[in-house]
């Protein structure tokens, strides 16, 4: 054999070995932990779809560090205890490098000690009550000064002074309403009533009657999951929504509205197509992202979802946050050249920004929260939110509202936890109808 032939053979073997090793590199596993069943499935299934779309796109571009990202999907079943157990299983058994998940604060509170115990990372995509800043959680959704506080102030300036607070009975609505009541006190507002129902509740007739008797200007709605279907139906039956009463919802977006409409069209086929006008008149929302943002980037963003999931697909704020949370994690891991060390990844994450339809997304190094543009929208008869107001720039996140001390907020949380008997919610009822199949 000639020297040239021998050298060529050696090169073929060497490069073949290197290529084969690359090809055989194991996938990078990540957990996708959301409710696929139960009362919260109406909201969380779509967030799973958004997370999976981002992973699919990254894989199509070559993956992360030359490796494919493999999602490991787990169902939290709308139960915080299940979320905690599934998070531990994902980390210890499936060896995931990060978890993308949770909607309710009760589920996040259950996962928080798990990711801290194993020094893992949770990317949390939903607005919440604040009063927390874990080194193992990246908060992609709004803090109180990026949703609940501006929502209350805007309503006071534009809709009226008397507020009726209605929420699901768990940590987010309770604490968000505490923040809202203090904000109302500062700006001359009034609390006309405050009521809660268990997660999954279908009985809102009594609450609707109390609202009717109280005659507020604004309902501040922190009801979550498919309970909203029953809540809006009760308001419709009492004939109290309309020109004289507005409802500001903090947990309802475009995707939930699509599911509501499907439900009501089946329930009232004779009134199909009239749902938005008859049941949701005077509905407002405060989010960082709306599907109606009129930019080429957002048009392209929505188009990718509809190409994947169908032309009628709707995209909301937590879906957008979840999608770009995957991209931020991937970008930081690529720069760190490491998916195993959370601190190394976070150090890279703090210095980068992702251009998103809501505006540039950056993570604050002092509390792991995202800077967010705040927007107020009013629902129109086409099922879109017309954007009425937006902050001029992304708002710096404040996990603990400045008008009370951190010990004050922590004492409130501790008292609530005791009242719930060592849990973060008062309980969960079996899911009713109205969720997306």
Image (spheres, grey):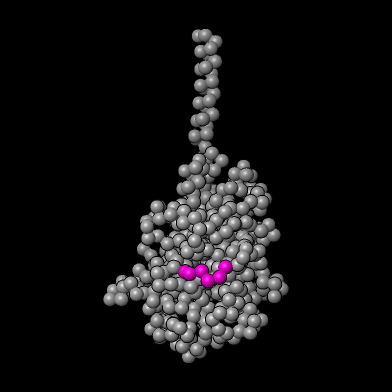
Relative to 67, does residue 198 appear above or below in the rendering?
below
Front residue (pair 271, 40): 271
Q: Quadrant of residue 423?
A: bottom right
Front residue (pair 127, 119): 127
Q: Is residue 263 at all visible to an observer of this figure? A: yes
Find residue 401 and report its horizontal and vertical position in percent. 67, 71
Find residue 173 and report its horizontal and vertical position in percent. 55, 74
Q: Quadrant of residue 136?
A: bottom right
Residue at 49% across, 66% down:
79
Residue at 55% across, 83% down:
160
Quadrant position of the C terminus in the picture: bottom left
Residue at 40% across, 72% down:
381
Q: Is residue 154 left or right of residue 435?
A: right
- Give the residues drawn in magenta, as a range: 385-390
Front residue (pair 38, 263): 263
Q: Is residue 406 magenta?
A: no
Main SS category, magenta section = strand
Residue at 65% across, 67% down:
399
Find residue 424 and report its horizontal and vertical position in percent. 56, 71
Relative to 133, does residue 159 appear above or below in the rendering?
below
Q: Quadrant of residue 43?
A: bottom left
User: Among all residues in the image, which is located at the extreme left?
Assistant: 270
């Amino acid at each position: 054999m000639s020297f040239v032939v021998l050298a060529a053979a050696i090169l073929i073997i060497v490069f073949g070995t290197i290529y084969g090793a690359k090809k055989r590199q194991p996938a990078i596993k990540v957990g996708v932990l959301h409710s696929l069943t139960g009362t919260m499935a109406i909201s969380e299934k779509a967030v799973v779809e958004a997370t999976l779309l981002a992973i699919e796109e990254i894989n199509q571009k070559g993956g992360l560090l030359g490796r494919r990202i493999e999602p490991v999907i787990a169902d939290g079943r709308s139960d915080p205890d299940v979320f905690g157990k599934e998070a531990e299983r994902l980390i210890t058994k499936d060896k995931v490098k990060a978890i993308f998940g949770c909607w309710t604060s009760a589920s996040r509170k259950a996962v928080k000690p798990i990711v801290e115990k194993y020094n893992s990372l949770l990317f949390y995509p939903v607005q919440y009550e604040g009063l927390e800043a874990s080194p193992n959680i990246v908060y992609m959704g709004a803090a109180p000064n990026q949703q609940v506080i501006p929502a209350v102030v805007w309503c006071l300036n534009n809709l009226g002074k008397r507020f009726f607070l209605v929420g699901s009975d768990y940590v987010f609505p309770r604490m968000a309403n505490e923040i809202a009541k203090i904000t109302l006190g500062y700006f001359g507002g009034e609390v006309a009533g405050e009521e809660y129902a268990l997660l999954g509740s279908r009985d809102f007739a009594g609450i609707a009657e109390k609202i009717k008797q109280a005659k507020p200007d604004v309902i501040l709605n922190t009801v979550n999951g498919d309970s909203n279907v029953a809540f809006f139906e009760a308001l419709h039956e009492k004939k109290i929504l309309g020109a004289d009463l507005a409802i500001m919802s903090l947990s309802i977006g475009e995707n939930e509205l699509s599911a509501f409409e499907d439900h009501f069209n089946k329930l009232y086929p004779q009134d199909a197509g009239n749902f938005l006008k008859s049941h949701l008149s005077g509905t407002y929302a405060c989010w960082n992202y709306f599907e109606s943002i009129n930019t080429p980037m957002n048009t392209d963003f929505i188009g990718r979802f509809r190409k994947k999931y169908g032309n009628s697909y709707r995209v909301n704020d937590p879906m957008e946050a979840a999608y770009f949370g995957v991209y931020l994690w991937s970008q930081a891991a690529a720069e760190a050249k490491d998916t195993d060390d959370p601190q190394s990844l976070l150090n890279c994450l703090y210095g980068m920004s992702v251009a998103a339809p809501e505006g540039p997304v950056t993570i604050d190094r002092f509390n792991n929260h995202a800077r967010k543009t705040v927007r107020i929208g009013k629902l129109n008869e086409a099922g879109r939110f017309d954007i009425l107001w937006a902050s001029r720039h992304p708002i710096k996140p404040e996990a603990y509202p400045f008008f009370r001390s951190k010990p004050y907020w922590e004492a409130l949380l501790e008292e609530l936890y005791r009242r719930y008997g060592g849990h973060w919610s008062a309980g969960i009822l079996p899911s009713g109808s109205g969720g997306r199949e």
